[in-house]
Image (cartoon, rainbow, N blue to C red):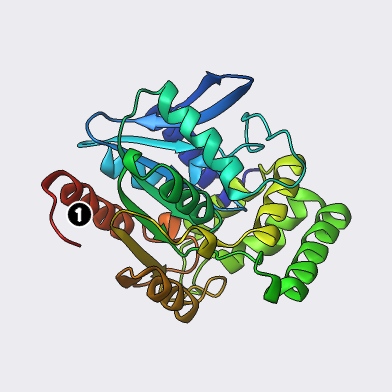
Amino acid sequence: MLHATDNTTLALQAQLEQAFALRLVQLPGSTQAIREAGCGPAIVLLHGIGSGAASWLQVAVQLSASARVIAWDAPGYGQSSPLPMPAPKAMDYARRLLQLLDALQIERCVLVGHSLGALTAAALASSAAQRLSRLVLLSPARGYGDPARAAQAAEVRSKRLQALEQLGIANIASQRSAHMLSAAASAEARAWVQWNMARLVPQGYRQAIELLCGDDLLRYADLGMPCQVFCGAADSITPPLDCQALADRLGAPFELIAGAGHASPIEQPEAVATLLAQTLDASLTGTAL
């Protein structure tokens, strides 16, 4: 017998394949999985450590009427080839992303990094600023790569790897997914967060843990383009005060997303899409943020 959550995810999966279809892009020495919809100015969406391209579904549906929306499954996620090194840094992910932009013939885009995806986004912004018109960081994870945070890095790495070995992906998803959302999140949002998290690939997840624990977003603080930082008002994973402090270090404006926890693209997709549409408009007109 199907539960209500099963019916919910089945409906979302059907919408996903119709409105935000999977595409495999062959790159030099690797395969990169993306989801794509719409046409117009390009906006590229990078997910966090416990998610995937499908997490952007409802945001993509709303943006695709006026933009070319591309979300990747990060290296080692979904059907994307993992990176060759066991402990990649943000610049390693950024090099793959640059290859993808070249393959898709995207000369310039708005780049959005959610959570751990913010590290990759900042790395690309600092190294290839000419390819980006705007940078948006949603609930950015700073990372623990600063030597002053070595003890925290060791603890986070140990806990996450231990959970992977002892619980497995499915149990991690069932236990951790609720923490990604506010207490008021809908059943549909809870089901979709868990569905996405349950599709993690162990090798890619291990590499992402190494990125989280071995790199620091502030290494890439010389961005060279307009940047905005947003955070869910009820985010308990990258709390508003931490995101505000990071925005201050980057010299970027900061804004809260009402009614959202960490997974704001799933919990409040209309609000996120509205903010990103405004950023797209600003990128085309040169309007100040």
Residue drawn at point x = 66 percent, y = 67 percent = 144
Q: Secondary structure at mark 1?
A: helix
Q: Residue 34: image x %, image y %?
A: 49, 31
In the figure, 132 relative to 226: above or below?
Answer: above
Compared across the picture, whether 119 is left or right of 110 comes to right
Looking at the rendering, which quadrant does residue 225 occupy? bottom left
Residue sitting nearer the eye, 244 or 173: 244
x 49%, y 28%: residue: 99
Residue 95 x, y percent position in the rendering: 54, 36
Residue with the most extreme bottom position: 241
Q: Badge 1 is on which residue?
A: 278
Point 17% across, 52% down: residue: 282
Of residues 201 and 127, which is closer to you in this image? Answer: 127
Displayed quadrant of residue 284: top left
- 120 vs 165, left or right, is left
Give the residue type at disc 1. Answer: Gln
Front-most of residues 169 and 226:
226
Where, by quadrant of the figure, is residue 76 drawn? top right
Image check: 137 left or right of 107?
right
- What is the quadrant of the N terminus in the image? top right
The picture places residue 72, in percent across and down from the top left corner, at 50, 37
Q: Quadrant of the C terminus?
A: bottom left
Q: Residues within 10 Å of mark 1 (few under 14, many from 20)?
A: few
